Amino acid sequence: MTLQISRRGKEYLKTAETLLHSANAATDRAVADQLKTLAEMYEQRAEQASHADAAKALARASAAAATPFEGDWT
């Protein structure tokens, strides 16, 4: 199963990419390592956010499907 990345997840990934770019440009090895670690954390957050957003969307869809229709079908 392929998971779609949510908007919030995409923002986390964008931040991770920026951090990795900064890490590659850093001259201080300790700073570069910290930036890489932080980028990994943001990648994990992106995955978690996408899972949470997908679960919320599924719950909304299930709730909408369970609600009886009270309108006119004509």
Image: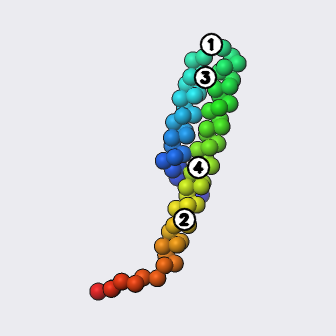
Residue under the image location 54 percent in, 65 percent down: 58
* Snapshot colouring: rainbow
Percent position of residue 55, x then y: 58, 60
Question: Which tag, 2 or 4, sits closer to the chain's start?
Answer: 4
The residue at which mark 2 appears reads as 58
Report if residue 3 is visible in the image. no
The residue at which mark 4 appears reads as 49
Q: Nearer the viewer, residue 70 or 29?
A: 70
Question: Which tag, 3 or 2, sits closer to the chain's start?
Answer: 3
Q: CA distance from mark 4 to mark 1?
A: 32 Å
Report if residue 65 is visible in the image. yes
62 to 9, vertically: above or below: below
Label disc, if present, on residue 1 of the rendered structure: none
Q: CA distance from mark 2 to mark 1?
A: 46 Å
Label disc, if present, on residue 27 of the rendered structure: 1
Label disc, if present, on residue 23 of the rendered structure: 3
Q: Quadrant of residue 24?
A: top right
Q: Nearer the viewer, residue 38 or 24?
A: 38
Q: Residue furthest front?
A: 70
